[in-house]
Image: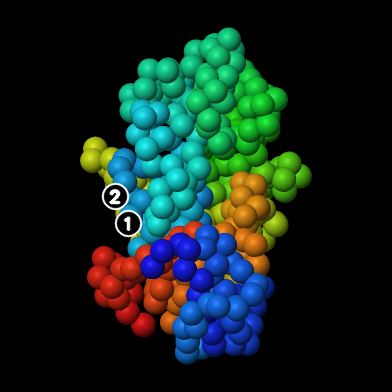
Amino acid sequence: MSATTKIALTNVRVFDGEKILDPTTIVIDGEIIGSDPTGAIEQDCEGAILIPGLIDAHIHLGSIKDLKNMSIYGVTTALDMATWPLELLTSLRNQKGMTDIRSSGISVTGPGSTHSYLLPKESVIRSVDEAKTFVARRVAEGSDYIKIVCDKPGPEQDVVNTITEEAHHHGKLVIAHAATVAPFEMAQIAGVDMITHIPLDNVLPKEYVDRMVADKCISIPTLAMMEGMARIRRRAKYEYARDSVTAQYKAGVPILAGTDAHSVKFSPFSVRHGESLHHELELLVAAGLSNLDALKAATSLPAQYFNLDDRGVIEPGRRADLVLIGGDPLQDIRATRLLKRIWCAGIEVEPIKPGSGGCLMM
């Protein structure tokens, strides 16, 4: 179906960001959600539930196949946290009928860090001057935000501070990678906007959680990745990650659903694009989030905090990123897997078949 076809989804129950509404009609008018059903082709949804297209707040891209895999699982927007070369990233932007992306471009690390052996040489920053040049180049290339890999060994604190200051000067959000407690503190000292991952070496100290609340810092814990890494790393415990998310949630830290999905062949643990976001929602609920807050973590909240004002909720004028499902996720979060129909900016995408590719039968 083309994006110019005007259709009216009748007898559909809409998730309005807080609750499931009584059956109504939603108009898809080209790439946006319309308000006038005149002239639309009516399609009866038989009481199924319509949710906003899902947003994965932490992924990596290797090819157009990754976009296709996410879209068939209802992930209509993905926030990339390091893809290169620039030519590849540019080719994956604005693909019609597929997952829409935003990206940091390459990310920052420091000499001696694990990521320094994985990322391009330009990512390895040794001084404040290099940090300023790095940010200027990412801005010139069109990066939507800046990503820092905080690690020990890794970038020095003054480098992390400068990256953050320069990014903010250019109006860019800063997202910091921190998978253990010490780098988490580095990110907080620098005043980053979001911290992705959650420590596997210990539970976050209460003062760190309280500081996130005071600084209005956002968490993208990527529990799907942390669960996998805990299985293969000595002294790493998934319980630390889970309990830290529980503490964040109870304290009022905003939590976004991100997976760290990637298709890198040499990675020690693979998180699959698309399916993993549904698993992430289940892990967030197991960590204490309500079904409602888990669903918001993959819809309205990432749209809000990444300034994606055209999506994340279902209302006229918004981008027609929509997912029709056969169950109520506010009763059982696994219902997000019961994919019936998917639209990426008004273009319908055939969902993954039930029972295939890791989908849960309910």
SS class, disc 1: helix
Foreground of the two, 112 or 294:
294
Give the residue displayed 51% in from the left and 50% down from the top: 57
Cβ atoms at labels 1 and 2 below 8 Å apart: yes
The residue where tag 1 is placed is 69
Is residue 296 visible to us here?
A: no
Is residue 121 visible to us here?
A: yes
Q: Which mark is residue 65?
A: 2
The vertical placement of 248 against 349, above or below, is above
Q: Position of residue 303 (x, y in %)?
A: 61, 54
Q: Which image quadrant is residue 354 in?
A: bottom left
Does 9 sit left or right of 307 as displayed?
Answer: left
Q: Residue furthest front?
A: 39
Q: Which image quadrant is residue 298 in?
A: bottom right
Give the residue displayed 61% in from the left and 50% down from the top: 308
What amino acid is labelled 2 in the image? Lys
What amino acid is labelled 1 in the image? Asn
Q: Position of residue 190 (x, y in %)?
A: 65, 28
